Amino acid sequence: MRSKNENLMKQILDYTEDFRLQFHRSPSTNEVAKALGIVKSTVYRYLVEMNERGMLSYHDGEIETEKTRKLSPMSKSAAILGSVSCGLPQLEEEYVEEYVSLPVSLFGDGEFFILRANGDSMTGAGINHGDLVVIRKQNTAEEGQIVVALVDNESTLKRLYLDAKRQCVRLHPENEKYPDIYTKECSIQGIAVHVIRPLR
């Protein structure tokens, strides 16, 4: 067998890993061939050679690398939606910017969506303007949890408390600049479980 192009081997390896991260499955030889601009039979010969060298595992059409073996097989799709107010409530923006995969091993099981924090009323809870807040979709919450609440058709992100004296819900901002919101009509859309932000 003729010696193989080391650069092409690296391209196949990189493409396979990127494909697995994006689509959560192994690419077919046809998909690798199309992406790299080579013929399918060449991809097959390279995969066999790379398997023999221990660079990857290639069995029954499945390509696996050291990196993809460590990927969590379980993930949940979550939509990144518009912003949610962390100041005063604002009209809910229900457009989907994109869908991302959240590994179950890090985020847990459930149905999720992601909102962009807008404003500074939750800075005391570690949620800053522009942060991506991962929300577990549910219509109930325990006292003290940070929730996305729908009040008068407007969404807001606040800490939930029950006010027995006023017999209503108190939505508490984590910034003393803002007043509590008291309401008897409040629909819980989900609870905040994670914050995703770049380090500055």
Image (cartoon, helix red, strand yellow):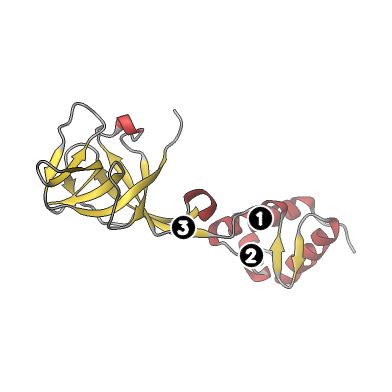
Quadrant location of the C terminus?
A: top left
Q: Mark 1 points at which residue?
A: 68
Q: How crowded is mark 3: few (under 14 residues within 10 Å), some or many (20 or more)?
A: some
Q: Where is residue 87? Give x, y as percent.
A: 20, 36
Q: Which amino acid does label 2 sit on?
A: Ser
Secondary structure of the residue carrying numbered label 1:
helix
Labelled pair 1, 3 in contact (Cβ < 8 Å): no
Q: In this view, does 198 lie to the left or right of 5?
A: left
Q: Residues within 10 Å of mark 2 (few under 14, many from 20)?
A: some
* Above or below for 156 versus 176: below
| Mark toward the start of the polypeptide (1 vs 2) | 2
Q: Residue at x 83, y 57 (%)?
A: 4
Q: Name the residue under label 2.
A: 26
Labelled pair 1, 2 in contact (Cβ < 8 Å): yes
- Distance of label 3 from label 2 (alpha carbons): 24 Å
Foreground label between 1 and 2? 1
Q: Name the residue under label 3.
A: 109
| Mark toward the start of the polypeptide (3 vs 2) | 2
Q: Which amino acid does label 3 sit on?
A: Asp
